[in-house]
Image (cartoon, rainbow, N blue to C red):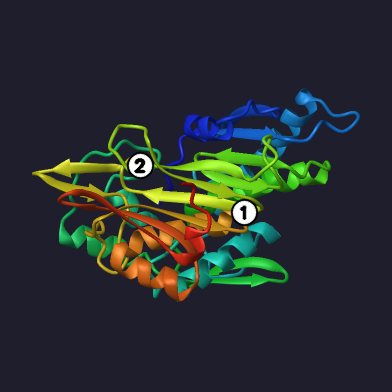
Amino acid sequence: MPAFGLAFFIIISLLSACAKPRGMQLEGVYGTALWHVTLTDEFPAGLDQVVLRAGITQALSKTTQQIAGWDKSSEISQFNAHQSTQWFAVSPDVARLSELALRLSAESAGIYDITVRPLITLWGFDSAQETAGYVPVAEEIAAARARVGYQKLQVQLEPPALRKTQVDLHVELASLADGFAADVVGEYLESLGLTNYMVEIAGEIRTRGVSPRGDAWRVAIEKPLDGQRAVQQGVRLRNAGLATSGDYRNFFIKDGKRYSHTLDPATGYPVTHQLASVSVVAQQGALADAYATLLMAMGEVKGKAFADQHALAAYFVWRTDAGFEVYATPAFTQLLMD
């Protein structure tokens, strides 16, 4: 269940408001997404744009080899193809991310589930295919649901390994992949002594230190409009990641009914609530990414209660007959721009 939002041109417009940025900006391609890096610091001796870009590309290539479900040679793809219930060795990062996902699955009583890929494919929301607008019959949904269930996945950190109790289980880490990739790039920059930066990958953000303005990084939450780009709300970030999940980029309408790509594992059907987007701020991009997906699946009522209960910094936008309504948790309110 991929996250959407935070158009980069909007981010840059806020970053440069009232002052000309003195930082440097780099960009490139990660899978089917774009990445952008904005630096405040001067380059250390011996480092230039060519070296930095190559290092970022190498760091992102490593994440592809670990968690990219679309890459058949990746660790997670090899695990999915592993027709056994024996332990399967993975890298520490894959084990750690899987453990995080299972923790959030337990916290959400299974609303967040990284084994939901059979349902996503059945409904035509697979990233490798265009939405066909197909509504499955009950028997097809039941068959797909039989292959879903986070309880069927086990993780150990030492030595790092995954184990499935059902051989046709399919694990998909896309719900936190872009946030994790932003973290990986950020950690690479910090290894070079660059401590003031913003990384953006497919709308997911990681910031550290100060912006080229000398203060907090200013980014924008996108208004959840179909086929349009506009600012919903500006926020100030420092030493934090931000992720947005929404239903306004990946959906289809059939017989007058809107079908979201966000699926409920308990029913096998797209969610029916009115939540259009939710944004989460956390210290790490991967955690913000996963929580944004979790809250989007819960909807505006259960999601708000969950976010408040767990003291999350979250911002909700949902549809009403009169337009949009919003809610910011107390932790998120502190970050809002006027």
Q: Residues within 10 Å of mark 1 (few under 14, many from 20)?
A: some
The residues bearing labels 2 and 1 have C-alpha atoms spaced at a distance of 21 Å
Q: Which mark is residue 263?
A: none
Residue at the image position 79 percent from the left and 28 percent from the top: 51
Q: Residues within 10 Å of mark 2 (few under 14, many from 20)?
A: many
Depth check: give the residue in front, 93 or 138: 93
Across and down, in percent, residue 40 comes to 73, 35
Q: Which mark is residue 240?
A: 1
Q: Amino acid at mark 1?
A: Ala
Residue at the image position 17 percent from the left and 42 percent from the top: 253
Residue placed under numbered mark 2 in the picture: 223
Across and down, in percent, residue 274 comes to 24, 56
Across and down, in percent, residue 6 comes to 46, 40
Q: Is residue 266 shown above or below 201?
A: below
Q: Amino acid at mark 2?
A: Lys
Horizontal side of residue 249 vs 10, given as left or right: left
Residue at the image position 52 percent from the left and 59 percent from the top: 334
Across and down, in percent, residue 146 comes to 32, 67
